[in-house]
Amino acid sequence: MARLESYRAKRDFAVTPEPSGAEAASGSGRFVVQRHRARRLHYDLRLDVDGVLVSWAVPKGPTLDPKARHLAVHVEDHPLEYLHFEGVIPGGEYGGGDVIVWDRGNWRPARTDDPARAIRDGELHFDLYGEKLAGRFVLIRRDQDGDKEQWLLLHKNDEHAVADWDPEEHPASVKSGRTNDEVAARPEAIWRSGAPAAEAEQRLEQPEQTWDPPSDDELVALAKLRSEGRWRIGGRDLKLTNLDKVLFPAAGDNADEPPVTKRDFIRYHAEIAPYLLPYLAGRPVNTHRYPDGVDKPGFWHKEVPSHAPKWLTTWRNPDADEDETRRYAVVDSMPALAWLANYAAVELHPWTSRLPDVREPTWALIDIDPGEDTDFDDVLVYARLYRTALDFLGLAGAPKVTGQRGLQIWVPIRAGYTFDDTRQWVHRLSRMIGKTKPDLISWEWEKRKRSGLIRLDYTQNASNKTLVAPFSARPRPGAPVSVPITWEELDDPELRPDGWTVHTVLDRLAEVGDPLAPLIGVQQELPRL
């Protein structure tokens, strides 16, 4: 396409992972804003006009502040494939640096039916429908600096305007939830120049991510704090409050395990981080909070509060309705876990899917939920039946005690399945299991209709339906923990669903490790049933 000649002339596509624009497409009404750290940080605003991305470099970034007038330099058109590009452009190449998809969505021209002509005439009014940006914007050409046209970008004073709105306070990618630093450190994709656009993206093999435990000095500093104060952990400063408040009362008369204070719980979250974070990182997380302790009513909390630290990784759900959670925490660091503990987030429930493919689960979940008239021995009967079935099918999976009364089985699956696929598959398998011993189970949805029987629950295989994370605490006296176990432990007469607590689970991990960890990321086909 002739309009891309300037773009192509500045790049060596044997070196840069950027798309070459080998194929053109018609206008789609989409836009992207990319936060681009090249020689200088700037934001690239790109509007799809007639099958190319007409582009402006905005040093201070777009804003919702109606009083701001930001410079926007009109640069060369980019190929449509650039809508999704997030990665690193090699040093020495034009625009070398890291790029994230800072915002994206749809756009619509205003006051014209011919946006290309409006751009040539030097004034474009348009509406954005993004995840961060919304409302009426105006681009106005002001000066010519050599071959670069200098424009002004402004936001009209409409219902979407926000005074003093700073794009730098919203640094994360809407595509991956990651910052420029994180993308630069671990780029996940490249583009192969010369390939058709549909085949150009090549996923990079990622090294397994690991997390270090807190240092002895960090733990000593936590112990020395008074009832509140600032704690530096993992390179972040946290403001901690009510550190001596009891979150978990002691379990009965067990003198060996005293009540768990918020200070104790923050320490636990820091120490368990290397084991817990692999199940949380890259996933939106729902939290169950108990600010007054677990002996008082708690509540579900999903929306990230406005006072959350700015370094906390978050994800905005573009599909959320007005009354639904818009911004979720993506818990990917030890400081994030410690912050959640200070926030009295007792239970952590990660989504079954990872960003950016939130409609594709990575686990198929089996939940053996006991009733009032059944006990853990009855639960184990069905867990052993699932063990036999998965072994027959040649599928790897691992059981996990819930820390309360039940047991779950997590089965890793390949990319590409939908929640409908996993829900239907687990439903079929569970019906088969149920037929072998039907006397202890009920298929009723509501607990009050189950007559105290067990439910083999497959319904958690759905978007935003979650099960408690491995090594998350449960809201019970004594602070029991949900713990992965081996299949052989199903035959241990001493096994209990709440047998490990925040006081003892680290000793177990030091002794036997985590049996579920080797299954993270395993790609398995679900066989036909």
Image: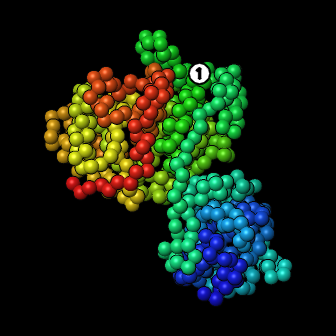
Q: Residues within 10 Å of mark 1 (few under 14, many from 20)?
A: some
Viewport quadrant of the C terminus? bottom left
What residue is at 79 percent from the left and 79 percent from the top? Answer: 149
Q: Which residue is mark 1?
A: 245
The answer to which image quadrant residue 103 occupies is bottom right
Q: Is residue 84 left or right of residue 181?
A: left
Q: Is residue 61 left or right of residue 22?
A: right
Q: Is residue 316 left or right of residue 482?
A: right
**Which of these two is toward me, 171 or 128?**
171
Q: Residue 255 at x, y = what percent?
A: 47, 10
Q: Residue 381 at x, y = what percent?
A: 22, 32
**Which of these two is toward me, 368 or 99?**
99
Give SS at disc 1.
Answer: loop
The answer to which image quadrant residue 131 occupies is bottom right
Q: Is residue 68 above or below residue 72?
A: above
Viewport quadrant of the N terminus? bottom right
What residue is at 60 percent from the left and 78 percent from the top? Answer: 20
The image's colouring method is rainbow
Q: Residue 225 at x, y = what percent?
A: 69, 23
Q: Is residue 494 above or below residue 69?
A: above
Q: Visible in this render: residue 20? A: yes
The answer to which image quadrant residue 243 occupies is top right
What residue is at 67 percent from the left and 46 percent from the top? Answer: 310
Q: Visible in this render: residue 61? A: no
State how many labels appear: 1
- The amino acid at mark 1 is Lys
What residue is at 67 percent from the left and 34 percent from the top? Answer: 233
Hey, which residue is sitting farthest bottom in the picture? 2
Q: Residue 442 at x, y = what percent?
A: 21, 38
